[in-house]
Image (cartoon, coloured by chain):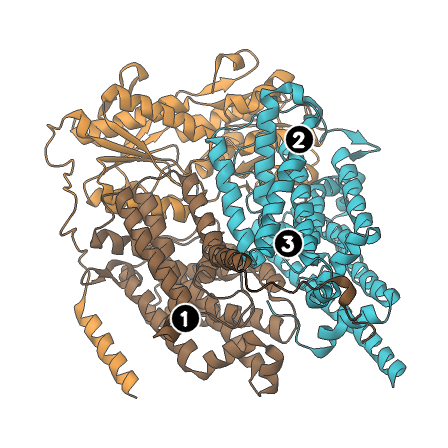
Chain colours: A orange, B brown, C cyan
Amino acid sequence: MLATVAALTMAGGFLAACSTEAPTTAGDSQDTTTASDDGSMAPGDIKIFMAPKFTGLAYFEVARAGGEQAGQDLGIDFQYIGSDKPEATEQIATLTNAIPQAPDALVVSAIDGDAVAPALKEAMAAGIKVVTYDADAAVDARDLFINQLSYELAASTMLDAALINSPEGGLVAFISASPTAPNHTAHVRIMKELIDTDPKYSSLSYVDTVQFAGDDATKSQQLALGLIQAHPDLKVIISSSAVSAPAAEQAIINAGKGGQIFATGVALPSSVRDFIKSGDSKAFMMWDPAELGYVATVAAYQLVTGEITAEKGTMIDCGAAGTYEVLDDGEVQYNKPLMFTADNIDDFDF
Amino acid sequence: MRRALRTYAPELLLVVLIVLAAMWSSTLSPYFLNSVNLLSAAQFFVIFALMAFGLFPVVVQGEIDISLASTLAVGSVLVATFSVNGVPLALALPLVLIATALLGVLNGVLVTYGHLPSLAVTLGALGAYRGVAYLLAGDAGITGITPDYLLLGSSWVGIVPSSVILALVVAGVFWLLMGRTSFGRYSYAIGASPEAARMAAVPVNQVRVGAYALAGAMSGLAGWVWVNQYQSARGDNADGTILFVLTAVVLGGVSIKGGSGKAVGVLLATVLLGTIQTGMKLANVPGTSQTLVVGALLIGSIGAPRAVQLVRHALSPARRRLRITGAAQHDPDVA
Amino acid sequence: MTAPTTRATADAPGLVARLGLSDGAAALRVRFMGVIVFQVLLMVAFTSVTPRFLTWDNLQSVLFTAAILAIAAAGQTLVVLTGNLDLSVGSIMGVTAYVVFDLAGNTPALGPWVVLLAVLIGLVLGAINGVLVTVLGIPSIVATLGTLSLYRGFVSFYAHATEVTIGELPTWIRSLAPTRWLGLSSYVWIALALVIVVGVALRTLPWGRRLYAYGSNPRAAYYYGLSTHRIVIGAYVGAGVIAALVGLLLGAQVGNINSLLASGIEMQVLAAVVIGGVSIWGGSGSIYGAALGAVVLATINNGLVLLGVQESFRLLFQGGAIVAAVAVDALVQRRVLSATRRRSVGVTS
């Protein structure tokens, strides 16, 4: 009885003390200057964090190299943060713990574009500039999105790669990372549209159900094998995931169908050099992740110093890496696709 | 005094470790010793704490439940669906808790009345409930949660976020439940010896199913907290996190064989893990090192006391263990 | 986890042993039959809905998919028979695959010695597990949970976020997966060979019998004078070596190896073991059953993909299958052992 009364009084007390105002960081052990104060900071003071989906993937390491190069060129403090586990909760924990360190900008590739949104919005509220690259977050949770390829360009390039492999066309199946990866879902949607409407791709047809491999190599292989069995006239497997595309191709070779069925899509040249040389799969595509990382970091830097704003029409000058325009919804399109074939595969070292 | 020290030895060890971890973290990063930051980081661990408390009675009874993360996903998706369909929170939350408790009951019934091993049953449930979560969530997951559902994640009592208060309240509830009620007493008895408990007229089956139901409900609650923190819900929410939850329970001094462990231990273990993880993340320690530290911590905290015991025993000159050799034995088949 | 509470099952393994090998073997055989029946039922069900299931091309694809998991399940069975678990198998696979192929890529002269290197790695990692569980007395769930993180952290650290690309793998092992002998992939034959070797060793070697004895009743085994530490460590070393070999095969199958290879596979391996009729409490179950459990899982996956069933239903079905398999197994066990109990009452009264 007494316990219940005590509990109720405590509950009442708590409810009374409840507020929806976030407490401010009082009694800091660190002086936090935010970027919005003044634009006249020396470059050495500027801190930019790059947070990939997770740190174990070679693709992100290449982008990291680009970011570090930008860090050197601009003379800023560039740090690479993240967990080595491909879990959304881990990335959110990383981002949440980045905020108190008061970086001037975050450059992020989001595992789950919706789940990271609250953390990113918190960062923006704290005056941190947020630039996404490679995989976008919710539009209102970031200032800019450096899209390696516009979704239309990515889709058409992957279909072109498919046609290089199988010029007579044929049945196509899709493997994506997850249903909530905005880039992968957009790619598939547009690829299906192009196959339906564009005469260039009229020789292709597609399997409507999309498979999801979560960027896991073993799962991609199981899915590829399953697809081969389920669709006897399958010709091409396309994947936007740099892990799934090569894994699927290896699965095809393991099944003894190399050269009859092809896997293509996005992949690092080092992962597929062997396939291209042996002719098992004649084309893969990507972009230069290092330059992407470079551009994203430079864009973040320029936002911090006030050189640019996130408004549509703003031009971002990245020196030798090119000049880019801000489009709708803060999207910047890098748009330099690379098609890897037998002719040029040896030109790349990543 | 000495007895208190001995009964609470594992928990005291945890407190010492927490203090050490905090000191280490503050040297790693100047941002650590900031109360607002710490509490904000604590929010992140509320979900795991809730699941750990749910798992706690189950492990005390000598069983296990590895399907809790999948139950959380079902819970979070249900909460999100209710929100998007305009159902008031006061109605939605109890419904979700009942639904997730029922999932737990299913596990409990299979283990208790079906006499099936809990690891196997909850292994199956892990996949099955995950599938249910995906089915309910649809492909794209659910966003657009209404603000009234998000109150837990956007309100503070003083500088303490409400979700952290929730975790503390739940900790208190479980401390009472396991320490002061017959359910708690029965749980420890079942964990120590199910046969003896049965003979002592303990309603073993009901208590067992009850623990599973409670675990399910806690996961459902954690699902609501999830929606608050991430303002979205997807079928793959919390996938793979059960191992972390199990780590917290075991680290908290709860014996995996059953029969012992305290709620305060589970709370302290979660705080310890949270302190270390937060400290490392604030210092941008590379992900690989974080993984190594957690693994070493788990093995070290359980293994070190025993290693010390072994060494002490081996070094003690007065007592030699009697080595039981094969020749001096009764053949159990003959006896 | 507590042992079963019904009196029959608590006494059962000792009882079965007391009544002589024939009944124990009968119990094992019955459990094994259960898995076979389950598999046949699945195949019939799938074929009736989609005839393409029963084509040779499809069936050999199922076997290929099952091969790696079957070997891993055989290894895990050694540990489960002692009443323990090994959750670190995935990490052992990942470490072996990356380290061995990385070294092999840099020193092509190694040739087939890479297999020896893999065995060594599996031996060491498995031994560590064994020591933690026996000497330090850490419960196996906890110990192998810890080593799961430790080993994975190690390979993550070693790899520095780089990949071992296909081109760096030794050609002889890379060409293994696509090679076909008598129409089946070499992996299937290798899996068959390894499973048979382990199964026969367990059945004929005295060490194998000691493993079953210890698993059925650890205390009795100890009093009987069996070196319990050596038995359990031996089981973990066996599981480690097998996991390392699986790592090699998996790495060669996947091609591009990063530090995350085989993450999370431990759940699938456990599922295969459980479906295969191996008792989680230790002391009974067969290697062949566990390997067949892997085939069951692969069959389910394959059938559902053929039917175009979406991922969520697949998960549901797999989870249900695990529970169903365990339930069937428990039923069978109780049926067989109540029969033997009745017989024993007749003998002694």
Q: Amino acid at mark 2?
A: Ile
Q: Residue furthest front?
A: B318
Mark count: 3
- The residue shown at (64%, 47%) is C308
Query: Can you say whether B246 is above or below A132 in the image?
Result: below
Residue at horizontal 36%, vertical 48%? A115
Q: Is residue B250 left or right of residue A304?
A: right
What residue does disc 2 label? A252
Name the residue type under label 3: Leu
Label 2: how many residues lie within 10 Å, few (<14), some (14-19) or many (20+)? many
Tell which subunit mark 3 falls on.
C
Looking at numbered disc 1 in the image, what kind of residue is underneath it?
Arg
Can marks 3 and 1 be said to lie on one chain? no
Image depth: mark 2 or mark 1 in front: 1
Q: Is residue C107 left or right of residue B135?
A: right
Residue B14 image-quadrant placement: bottom left
Q: Inspect this view and state whether residue C227 appears.
A: yes
Q: Secondary structure at mark 1?
A: helix
Eyeballing the image, is A44 above or below B150?
above
Task: Give the percent coordinates (x, y) of residue A345.
Answer: 53, 15
* In-front residue for pair B250/C94: B250
The correct choice, above or below, for B66 with respect to A270 in the image is below
Q: Is disc 3 placed on a helix, strand or loop?
A: helix
CA gap, disc 3 and disc 1: 38 Å
Q: Nearer the viewer, mark 2 or mark 3?
A: 3
Closer-to-camera residue (C121/B76): C121
Residue at x-position 55% and y-position 80%: B206
Looking at the image, residue C150 sits to the left or right of residue C186; the answer is left
Q: Is residue A135 left or right of residue C301?
A: left
